[in-house]
């Protein structure tokens, strides 16, 4: 009799998870060993999988030879936003999971709502799961950002119950979930946004998007909140399980917004999308060539322009510097849009190699327009802007500076020179300063119609322009 009873019993496992970091243990603890948070362990009941027998054995999954699997390029779904499609690598891949993160009020929901309306206008069924807003609020926002009548293929599901919402998405091509931190699985004894809820939610969404046997469910676009440190709120497994992680950045006090890919299984992570937030929502900027420069043609001390590459496009970015003599023991070094550590190294090189003394001066540095000048090719423009400000000598307004500054003061060649020189020529620049190692490409680069000035070190540039 006991044998018959045991064969019918299902073995239920109890685990405890840290609500702050996701640490897992078999017993409750007052203090998490992973993050040392107090009273953060929550209980979770884990039932055996349906494929397990009473003894806990599980059937083996089928194997397929890689050569037997058909190699076909999946058709992508265009979002109607050229800038979004550029960052995604050509559009949304069916059955994929895309996570969009950003600060509150930056425009995440507006961007995905606009994409959903455009997809529905193109005849693709789109479901918007509103876990943070009511359906009338979604309609109000849709009327603000779109002058057309709502397309018949756009549907709103107002619920925070994830299993119920997933059942309502049957037959949809794209599902927008706003947001992953506010939906919940009712069978779990934890609040929305907890580590356990987010992990279980993303597992269920993945099962809905990728049902197996090569079939595809709807593509999911997930809105994600971020922490004070700028990371996606929740366990790190959230970013590991999705196919694409996008970051929507920008200063909320300014109109410009930048869309970047931090992870992309179906394309490059080097592309950038540029938008502008206006009274009627977001507008994409397809030609941001002169967007990151000052409007005036006059030359001012402390201003230098560099040609920087993001993905497949080049941008002319203006770097502005200001130096001020102070009597403080520790002068300030403030950088906006430029890596502060690179600023410190460039200041050391200017002092040691080029004789630009800034040990008793505050140095303020910024990239115009909110652009993030992350690549080393901006080093030369940063150095020349600082030297120009320190010596109060303006640089030529039609000269661009491109090159990485090493600790020895020499200049190194960045990649994609053709695009950098071509963009400078397109926007009317007369000359561009490049490292001396670019002489081998002189003929091809000169075809762009801009004069090439070669320099071996930062010392030569300082002596030539701000002596």
Image (cartoon, rainbow, N blue to C red):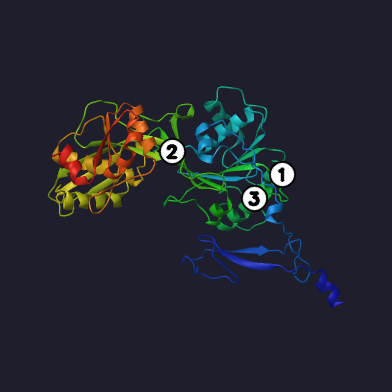
Image spot of residue 159 (x, y percent): 64, 42
Residue underneath mark 2? 258
Residue sitting nearer the eye, 454 or 25: 454
Relative side of 217 to 194, left or right: right
Residue 412 position within the rendered picture, expressed as x and y whole percent measured from the top left:
30, 47
Residue 375: name its quadrant.
top left
The tag on residue 167 is: 1
- Give the structural element (helix, strand or loop) at label 2: strand
Does residue 159 appear left or right of residue 278 in this picture? right
Task: Give the spatial CA distance, label 2 vs label 1.
Answer: 34 Å
- In primary-sequence order, the first of circles 2 and 1 is 1
117 sits to left or right of 395: right
- Residue 167 in the image, given as x and y percentages of width and height: 71, 44
Q: CA distance from mark 3 to mark 2?
A: 27 Å
10 Å neighbourhood of mark 1: few (<14), some, or many (≥20)? few
Q: Toward which corner of the image does residue 368 lie, by quadrant?
A: top left
Q: Earlier in the sequence, mark 1 or mark 3?
A: 1
Q: Residue furthest right?
A: 1
Mark nearest the camera among 2 and 1 is 2
Q: Name which residue lies at 48% across and 37% down.
A: 107
Q: Secondary structure at mark 3?
A: helix
Callout in the foreground (1, 3): 3
Looking at the image, residue 119 lies above or below residue 362: above
Residue 253 seen anywhere in this rendered image of the structure: no
């Amino acid at each position: 009799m006991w044998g018959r009873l045991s064969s019918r019993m299902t073995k239920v496992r109890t685990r405890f998870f840290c609500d702050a970091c996701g640490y897992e243990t078999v017993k409750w603890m007052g203090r998490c060993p992973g993050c040392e948070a107090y009273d953060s362990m929550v209980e979770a009941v884990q039932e055996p999988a349906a494929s397990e027998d009473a003894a806990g054995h599980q059937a083996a999954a089928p194997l397929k030879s890689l050569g037997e699997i058909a190699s076909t390029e999946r058709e992508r779904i265009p979002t109607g936003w050229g800038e979004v499609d550029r960052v995604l690598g050509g559009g949304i891949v069916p059955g994929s999971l895309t996570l969009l993160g950003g600060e509150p009020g930056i425009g995440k929901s507006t961007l995905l709502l606009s994409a959903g309306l455009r997809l529905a206008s193109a005849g693709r069924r789109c479901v918007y799961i509103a876990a943070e807003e009511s359906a009338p609020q979604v309609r109000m926002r849709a009327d603000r950002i779109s002058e057309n009548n709502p397309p018949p293929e756009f549907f709103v599901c107002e619920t925070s119950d994830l299993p119920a919402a997933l059942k309502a998405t049957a037959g949809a091509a794209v599902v927008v979930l706003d947001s992953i931190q506010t939906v919940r699985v009712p069978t779990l004894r934890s609040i929305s946004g907890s580590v356990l809820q987010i992990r279980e939610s993303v597992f269920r969404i993945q099962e809905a998007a990728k049902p197996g046997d090569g079939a595809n469910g709807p593509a999911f676009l997930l809105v994600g909140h971020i922490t004070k440190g700028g990371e996606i709120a929740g366990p790190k497994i959230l970013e590991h399980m999705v196919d694409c992680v996008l970051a929507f950045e920008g200063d909320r006090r300014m109109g410009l917004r930048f869309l970047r890919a931090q992870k992309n299984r179906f394309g490059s992570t080097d592309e950038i999308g540029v938008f502008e937030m206006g009274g009627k929502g977001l507008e994409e900027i397809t030609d941001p060539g002169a967007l990151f420069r000052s409007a005036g043609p006059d030359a001012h001390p402390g201003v230098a322009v560099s040609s920087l590459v993001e993905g497949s496009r080049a941008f002319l970015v203006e770097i502005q510097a200001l130096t001020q003599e102070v009597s403080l023991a520790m002068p300030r070094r403030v950088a906006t849009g430029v890596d502060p550590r690179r600023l410190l190294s460039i200041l050391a090189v200017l002092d040691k190699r080029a004789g630009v003394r800034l040990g008793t001066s505050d140095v303020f540095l910024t990239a115009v327009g909110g652009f993030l000048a992350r690549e080393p090719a901006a080093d030369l423009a940063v150095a020349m802007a600082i030297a120009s400000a320190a010596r109060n000598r303006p640089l030529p307004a039609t000269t661009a500076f491109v090159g990485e500054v090493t600790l020895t003061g020499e200049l190194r060649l960045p990649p994609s020179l053709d695009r950098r020189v071509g963009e400078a020529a397109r926007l009317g620049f007369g000359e561009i300063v490049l490292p001396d190692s670019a002489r081998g490409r002189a003929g091809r680069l000169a075809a762009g119609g801009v004069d090439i000035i070669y320099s071996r070190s930062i010392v030569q540039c300082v002596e030539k322009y701000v002596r």
